[in-house]
Amino acid sequence: MLTFIDYGNSKGGAKGRIWAIDPIDGTKGFLRGGQYAVCLALMVDGDVKVGVLGCPNLPIDDAAPLSGGMESGQTDEGKGCLFSGVLGQGAVSRPLTTGALAASQKISMKAITDIAAATFCESVEAGHSSHGDQAEIAKKLGITNPSVRMDSQAKYASIARGAGDIYLRLPVKATYQEKIWDHAAGDLIVREAGGAVTDIHGKRLDFSIGRTLADNKGVVAAPTGGHAQVLAVVQEVLKIK
Ligand SMILES: Nc1ncnc2c1ncn2[C@@H]1O[C@H](COP(=O)(O)O)[C@@H](O)[C@H]1OP(=O)(O)O
Ligand SMILES: [Mg+2]
């Protein structure tokens, strides 16, 4: 398996079929027994067509509320969920049950009726996403729910199934370029579940450039109806407009 992974030396780009894989996204979450994800995406000519996220420590139940300690939620049925999205065909979740593979069910983001009632997901690591900016954005939007911190693309999966509402990744270092394997599957699954995903400048994530999202900074993922409002406050707080 490790040898096979080492064959992964594609430079990415805008031509051909490219598989982006992150065998363990959220290594720190994996080590602390928290959230992590096994991520796979198929890109064709720079566009993500299929995305899969295996999240072994998320609750089986799509309706389970986001909370700290979710990872210890072993039930008789099992624990964890497999998420997938196919471009133009929607997104589904499939419980990782202890028995036979369960059927998949369609997932969708919660429509935002009152942004003040929304819940943010953010990184555990302050070095990956600015907690201070995030708190200021929440305040300006009137959000009082504490943000839920978790590692990995489990954040994309959680908002896609309506367990949380908004995922912000706010740049800490000006020089850091996000990696395609850290976002390709989550970006597609959220969009197929009724969300909008852009960077902090309002640009769609561009997976066609190479191994990194060299033309993007940060991530703003929210239900389509609330994205513009969230983005406006992100830009106000980050002073980029
Ligand atoms: N400075 C940084 N800003 C944003 N993301 C980062 C930074 N350094 C590492 N990462 C990546 O963040 C991802 C995990 O993010 P999260 O906080 O959402 O769990 C990892 O894939 C990690 O990449 P790497 O594995 O190469 O260190
Ligand atoms: Mg990763």
Image: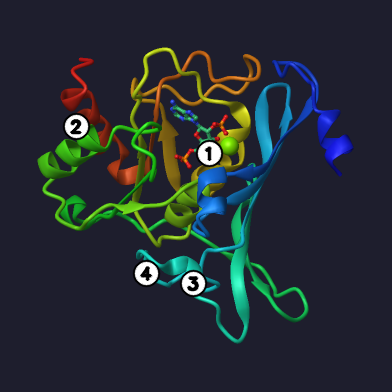
Q: Earlier in the sequence, mark 3 or mark 2?
A: 3
Marks 2/1: CA distance? 21 Å
Residue that label 1 marks: 187
Q: Is residue 4 left or right of residue 228?
A: right
Local crowd at mark 1 within 10 Å, few (<14), some, or many (≥20)?
A: many
Residue that label 2 marks: 233
Task: Give me the disc on residue 72.
Answer: 3
Marks 1/4: CA distance? 22 Å
Amino acid type at mark 4: Pro
Q: Is residue 182 left or right of residue 100?
A: left
- Measured along the vertical axis of the image, is residue 15 above or below residue 76? above
Marks 3/2: CA distance? 35 Å
**Quadrant where the C terminus is found in the figure:** top left
Residue 21 makes an appearance in the image: yes
Amino acid type at mark 1: Asp
- Tell me which residue sits at (41%, 20%) in the image: 217
**Quadrant where the N terminus is found in the figure:** top right
Q: Nearer the viewer, mark 4 or mark 3?
A: 3
Q: Is residue 62 left or right of residue 139?
A: right
Q: Nearer the viewer, residue 108 or 102?
A: 102
- Tell me which residue sits at (49%, 72%) in the image: 72
Q: Earlier in the sequence, mark 4 or mark 3?
A: 4
Q: Nearer the viewer, mark 1 or mark 3?
A: 3
Q: Nearer the viewer, mark 4 or mark 2?
A: 4
User: Do the numbered discs 4 and 2 sit on residues whose CB atoms are within 8 Å?
Assistant: no
User: Do the numbered discs 2 and 1 sit on residues whose CB atoms are within 8 Å?
Assistant: no
Q: Is residue 130 left or right of residue 36?
A: left
**Residue 121: where, in percent of width, then height?**
35, 49
Amino acid type at mark 2: Val
Local crowd at mark 4 within 10 Å, few (<14), some, or many (≥20)?
A: few
Residue that label 4 marks: 65
